[in-house]
Amino acid sequence: MTVLVRMVRNMASISGDWLDEGDWWEYLQRAVASQDGDKLDSALFDLEITRLTAYTFPEEDFQKLLQILEYPDFLQMVGTDDLIACFERESDILNDDQISRIVAAYEKAYPHINEWFGQFAVSERMSSICHDKRALAMWRHLMDVKDEKSRSCVPHGLEHLVKEGDDVVSRDAMELLLNMREDPSDWVRAEVQTSLERLKWREQVADDEL
């Protein structure tokens, strides 16, 4: 949870000027139905301000957000990255079961996210939510999706696990990343090479592995 969100939340609790607690969900559904990314971002911000505490992510609200990941209109819109950004900001109040369900939900939804940046955001932000064997299993499964665009972000997700996972996860993520050098797509192989070059700069990959 960012310092800014904490500050604004405290102000909101004093002023009472934000949406009523139930309104954010209706507003979010309208945003998805109209494919309006700006309204989606506003609805998520209202959720963070009016509903989330410093200690827990209410289960009722959490389930609603996961439900959005099943909406075809959401998966087709520009701005899907706002949802995983919300989960990332609030990762310190997610419980372990909620984290597992986020990983499972994104594994299912990821191939159907239409916007490339939405998929990239998952590869960039997921490790801030989960960087253990659950995330590793997710990326292992997504290595095999048919769509080239979807596979192009998998190396970046694995790269984060190499950097942020424990020794076992880091080792296994590196093995998967190296295996992706055999991907049939030029685009995907280029992304693998980019990730390996970044890891080399961080001294997490040997020259003979490039």
Image: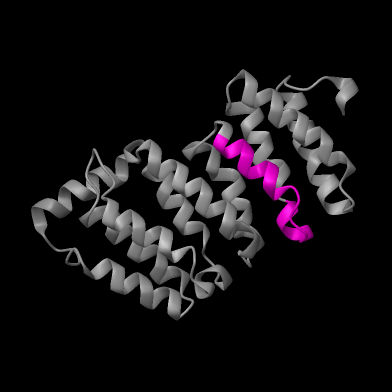
Give coordinates of residue 43: x percent, y percent.
Answer: 33, 65
Q: Is residue 7 left or right of residue 88?
A: left
The answer to whether residue 5 is left or right of residue 161 is left
Q: Count the numbered circles shown.
A: 0
- Residue 86: give x, y in percent of width and height: 41, 51
Q: Quadrant of the N terminus?
A: top left
Q: Which residue is nearer to you in this view: 129 or 104?
A: 104
Residue range in magenta is 134-152
Q: Nearer the viewer, residue 137 or 56?
A: 137
Q: Residue at x 77, y 29 (%)?
A: 175
In percent of width and height, residue 201 lies at 74, 25
Q: Establish if 41 lies above or below 137.
A: below
Residue 137 in percent (x, y) is at 63, 39
Q: Residue at x 58, y 57 (%)?
A: 108
In this view, 175 is above or below 19? above
Give the residue displayed 27% in from the left and 67% down from the top. 24
